[in-house]
Amino acid sequence: MGGVKKMKNWTPEEIKALRERFKLSQQKLSDRLGVSQNYIYLLEKGVKTPSKTLQLLLSCVEKELKTV
């Protein structure tokens, strides 16, 4: 029986850890996600919260980078 996978709620710490784990600058991650570098900065500081769409994109980027 196919279940629906629960969407990961990305915390500021997890976003920064993802970026650092794959040695990406804020600019490189922002380019992959289609947002500004400043937005990544604000996400990592906890000033902004990622939308559901951005959370899905973060999960996709994480999956993509793991397979490289």
Image (cartoon, rainbow, N blue to C red):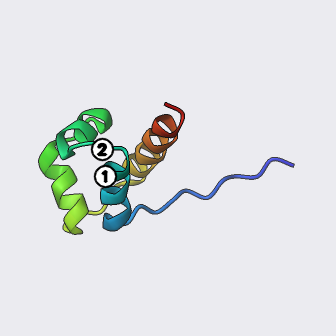
Disc 2 designates what residue? 23
Residue type, numbered disc 2: Lys
User: Among all residues in the image, which is located at the extreme right?
Assistant: 1
Residue at 81% from the left image edge and 47% from the top image edge: 2
Q: Position of residue 3 (x, y in %)?
A: 76, 52
Q: Is residue 55 above or below residue 46?
A: above
Q: Is residue 42 above or below residue 68?
A: below
Quarter of image, res 33: top left
Disc 2 and disc 1 in contact, CB within 8 angstroms: yes
Helix, strand or loop for disc 2: loop
Q: Position of residue 68 (x, y in %)?
A: 49, 30
Residue at 48% from the left image edge and 47% from the top image edge: 59
Q: Is residue 19 above or below residue 27?
A: below
Residue type, numbered disc 1: Glu
Helix, strand or loop for disc 1: helix
Disc 1 designates what residue? 20
Q: Nearer the viewer, residue 34 or 26?
A: 26
